[in-house]
Image (cartoon, helix red, strand yellow):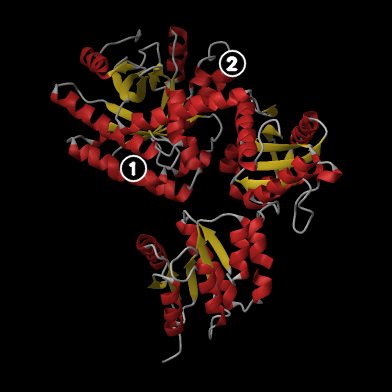
Amino acid sequence: MSGVKEKTPLILIVDDDFGLRLLMRASLEKDGFRVAEAENGLVAVSVFEKLQPDAILLDVMMPKLDGFDTCKTVRKMTGGIHTPILMVTGLEDLESIHRAFESGATDFITKPINWPVLNYRVKYMLRASNAFFDVIDQRKQIEVLAFYDHLTGLANRTMFKDSLDTALIDSAAEESQLAVLFMDLDRFKIINDTLGHHVGDILLKNVAGRVSTCIRDSDSFSRYGQDESKSCVSRLGGDEFTIMLPRLQTPEDASRVAQRIKNSLSHKFTIEGHEIFISASIGISIFPLDGNDSEVLMKHADLAMYHAKEKGKNGFQFYKKALNVKAKVRLDFENDVRKAVTNDEFVLWYQPQVDMRDGQIVGAESLARWTHPTLGQVPPSDFIPSIEELGLIVPFTDWVIRRVGEQQQAWKEQGYRQVRVAVNISSKQFAEQHLPQKLRESLEGNHLKPNAFEVEITESVMAEKKGETEEILEEIKKMGLTISVDDFGTGYSSLLYLKNFPISSIKIDRFFVKDIIKNPQDAAIIQAIIALAKSLGMTTIAEGIETSEQFKLLRSMGCDIGQGYFFSPPVPEEAFAQLVKDDFCYIETK
């Protein structure tokens, strides 16, 4: 019927960038929306008049008629006053955001676009429009969403930077000092993963509440409607907070606030029956000593925070110029790591895994090694975290899986018997690594049996996205591969994980093995893990075995497989092949 909209919402995309329109269309159509397009504001006005879309995604910077004027024009048209309009912009300054709202925008989103967030914003606008919210009131709500953190009510990054810019002008005029504190919670990820995001959110709100009591009266929070010229506390996202302290007499004033925050957070939190202890690392930069603008001060406070973490966490550190040098070294190192992943500079070494009963080599753990052109051998504990933080874990894991498959094929062609090789899979981007497909390609491409691989995961993998992770591991199990859990008992342990996930082996962490002879508690823990594994039909692998005494005690406890320097250190591929060929026995089997 003419004039009646179809049930599926129609979204008009207005952008002069064809590629971006294409991506927006794909994202929206995937969520079931119908889509129309316009390449500039003038075309958009014509399309709007003809199609009367349910919502508009409107770019700001366009030729002929920019987004602001297009928005004003639509608002004056028949049916345009209530149509939700989402402004899409690369501009993040407050002036542009205010101008967008003054032009009649319902909401805004910045480039680069987070696609799931874009779809969520569109759905939110449509829902709000369908409820007949008052347009002006809906706009008090949108500004709150734009400038304040919805979880804690604190200022967000945009509001904090604007408040800091204003305060710096005042401080320069008054020739007074100002401090920026950058705070990151220690161990928050472990708590969030173990107890769930709901508890994590409540903890963040409670932390925000405690920090509020640590700021002197004249440094009140910049919450809804309060004086923004005073100190401002913001949540940047996740577990990161920033605090601005203006009009300081000395830098020591900032350290006193940091100490109050540290003391306040040291008291336990009780959330839904859980007793939680948390601490924070805080970095402090001072105006004008450490910088004259907001970007530099926040950067320097961030560097000081990392310095506090390196010093042992649960403390605070002032910025020092030497940290810039250290940051430059770290940046250079990260660039070298990126090049190493791209240029295939890593090699794999293999540490044998030995049957505790007869000493036969039954498997190996593949371990990446990297020789830096100037630093020499770089330990994995240095380069693996960098690979994860740089978002390179997917191509790195691809390389490991491919290399292990190629090496297994080469050993097979040389006549060596096949032993399974464990591949460590990082918890970072676990669901995005498409493991079943890549493992299948490596096996089939190298004509290998499924028992050529073992997938080794940490307990944190099981703690994140449980349903999705379980599906991936079930698919790997159906392919015939074995799955082992590394570092068992070091923080995430849950019988529920072992019950619900298709685990074949449990690796007993070296932390428990190293003191097993002299520490009865560690021996008792290992005995319990072995008994638990046997009751669930799983094998146990003890890593970090270094002495004959450790080996004999673990064997007497019924541990199935051993790994450690007592048998062999990690060795290059040729040396490992020779060990398999010789079937070398490192132990007394009697």
Q: Nearer the viewer, mark 2 or mark 1?
A: 1
Horizontal relation, residue 62 to residue 439: left or right: right
Question: In terms of image quadrants, where is residue 566?
Answer: top left
Q: Position of residue 342 (x, y in %)?
A: 32, 34
Residue 478 in sight in this render: no
Residue at image location 46% in from the left, 88% down from the top: 4
Position of the N terminus by quadrant? bottom left
Q: Residue furthest bottom?
A: 1
Amino acid identity at mark 2: Pro
What residue is pinned by disc 2? Answer: 520
Label 2 residue SS: helix
Q: Amino acid at mark 1?
A: Leu
- What's the residue at 42%, 66% (across, down)? 15
Is 373 rendered above or below residue 339? Answer: above
Q: From this viewpoint, is residue 229 visible?
A: yes
* Quarter occupied by the C terminus: top left
Rounded to the nearest whole Å, what is the CA distance between mark 2 and mark 1?
40 Å
Rendered image: mark on residue 435: 1
